[in-house]
Amino acid sequence: MKRLLLLLIFSLFITNIYAQMKLNAGIVTSKIAESKKFYTEVLGFGVIFENDFYLLLHTPNKQAELSFLLPEHASQQPLFRTPFAGKGVYLTIEVDNVNEVYEKMKAKKVDIKIAIRDEPWGDRHFAIQDPNGVGIDIVTYKAVPL
């Protein structure tokens, strides 16, 4: 009984620690100005903070954040100085009506990398690419009948 109580207390403690987590993805890039223009004008993100070497943006609903950091900046530790090489990273943006967003992107003359389509697993999506080479999958999830 004592072990069970200790296990319960420990699990509540660990759960509480992890409940406080928030993810903020970041990209080390020299294209901070281009990234700001793309994410604010194309995707409607807002600016939370910016200076000469760092930019922090939020999604339109303020539920997620994305940051950009100038490479080789003296204020940063070596781990955060190497620029992103443009491959191997993607973002997924979930929207309520992917068809509407797709039409808006076409109207803005955004280069659509993958045309809108339905997948067997239930996604309806299309993809674009940011100035850093990051693929952005814009999706509406649909329930798939079992």
Image (cartoon, helix red, strand yellow):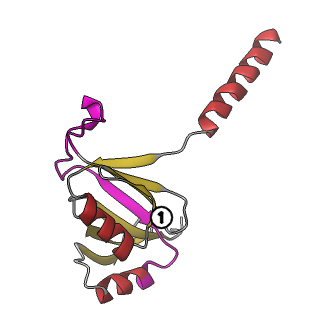
Extreme residue toward the left, this view: 85
Which quarter of the rendered picture does the C terminus lie within?
Answer: bottom right
Magenta span main SS: loop
Extreme residue toward the front, this view: 52
Q: Is residue 102 left or right of residue 110?
A: right
**Residue found at x 33% / y 77%:** 117
Where residue 3 appears, as percent x and y from the top left, is 76, 11
Q: Which residue matches tag 1? A: 59
Q: Is residue 105 left or right of residue 31?
A: right
Residue nearest the observer in this picture, 91 or 145: 91
103 to 144, vertically: above or below: below
Where residue 19 appears, as percent x and y from the top left, is 63, 39
Extreme residue toward the bottom, this view: 107
Q: Is residue 57 left or right of residue 72?
A: right
Residue nearest the observer in this picture, 18 or 144: 18
Give amino acid for label 1: Thr
Q: Which residues are magenta?
A: 71-100
41 to 94, vertically: above or below: below
Residue nearest the observer in this picture, 118 or 71: 71
33 to 98, vertically: above or below: above
**Residue found at x 43% / y 73%:** 44
**Residue found at x 30% / y 70%:** 38
Where residue 35 appears, as percent x and y from the top left, is 28, 63
Is residue 88 located in the magenta-colored stretch of the structure? yes
What element does badge 1 sit on?
Answer: loop
